[in-house]
Amino acid sequence: MDTIINYLETMFGNLPNTREVLKAKRELLQMMTDKYTELKAEGKTENEAVATVITEFGNINEIADDLGIDEVVNSTPNEVKRIVTLNEATDYVKDSGTAGIMCGAATALCITSLCGFIIFDDILPKRSLISAGVLGFLWMAIFITTAVALYIINGNRNAKWKFLEREACSIEYGTAKELQKMYDMHKTMRAIYISGGVLCCILSVFMGGFVDDIIKKHDFGGAAFFLFVAIGTFLFIRCGFITKAYDTLLSVNDRKTISGSFVDGQDDVSQLTGKAKDIMSVYWPTITCIYLCWSFLTFDWHISWLIWPIAAVLRAILIAILKKDTVSGTN
């Protein structure tokens, strides 16, 4: 019976999500269920019953008039979309997880690149042959160079998934349901990652004095501060990449069609059109840039993390405003 339901969802996938179409879908499901039950009662096998039901009711164009949606079916453009398979979807999520690790590590390296100046300034004698500034600069150069390399490698690795943004894609009912189950499982890990990231950011404020109290001969408190900020940032980025992957996959279907109605995880941004969608596509990268610039220029890491909850609230307000503009522009 699951095969029949999946087939039914595919049949109605591109039709508009209206009361009329939903009613026809329910009626057809009832007819298919009755026929399936009848065939099973006659002793047909599962495969035989499913094949007969699909053969009899599987062409939406032939039964559209009987269902009262002939005009809707004929007026709906038959747009050819690339179907994203379950294997492709799971591979994309895995690659996004790897991308999260690489980008998170690269960002952490950028943050901890300043630790060299703190460490070498403390451990090197004042009259050493090589100054702490030189070694600190070499430390920073190595860390930032490695970070840039990770960013570049990650960009090249994920170039194959650009079609999700550039092409008209769709996911079928069965794939969407499996992805939703995987997403629900990920939400538990997401909560752990976010909690860990917030904890590290909070602890970074206190770790400076704590480390200095333990290691009395050395002043490593500043390095400990940057280290905990880097760990927290890594956890945020690692979690964000995987969440973004699920949001991308679960929002490829048009929300105005039946195929969009069975997906609960669509991002509100997918409802926007035109310039509104372009604006929101650069929102988080812009926030990230502001966060890093503010943090590195002022070294107020104990305060700058507040930009993330503020940005989340502002994003919701901005989406609400842009939604109104999108709707008014289409009327």
Image (cartoon, rainbow, N blue to C red):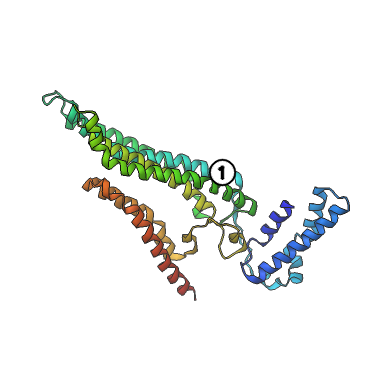
Q: Report whether residue 113 is seen.
A: no
Q: Count the marks.
A: 1
The image position of residue 72, as x and y in percent, is: 66, 71
Residue appearing at x 82%, y 50% in the figure: 48
Q: Is residue 133 above or below residue 237?
A: above
**Residue sitting farthest toward the bottom:** 331
- Relative depth, front residue between 157 and 25: 25
Badge 1 crowding class, 10 Å Cα cut-off, few under 14, some 14 to 19, many 20 or more, is some
In the depicted view, which residue is nearer to us: 228 or 111? 228
Lateral position of residue 186 relative to residue 320, left or right: right
Amino acid type, residue under disc 1 in the picture: Thr
| Front position in the image: 109 or 160 | 109
Residue 215 visible, this angle = yes
Q: Quadrant of residue 87?
A: top right
Depicted 25 relative to depicted 164: above or below: below
Q: Specify whether 289 is left or right of 88.
A: left
Above or below: residue 180 compared with residue 70 = above
Where is residue 131 drawn, in percent x and y? 15, 28
- Check disc 1 and report its element: helix, strand or loop: helix
Q: Which residue is mark 1?
A: 90
Q: Position of residue 286 (x, y in %)?
A: 34, 54
Left or right of 110 on screen, residue 30: right
Which residue lies at the image location 74% right of the left edge and 70% below the top edge? 67
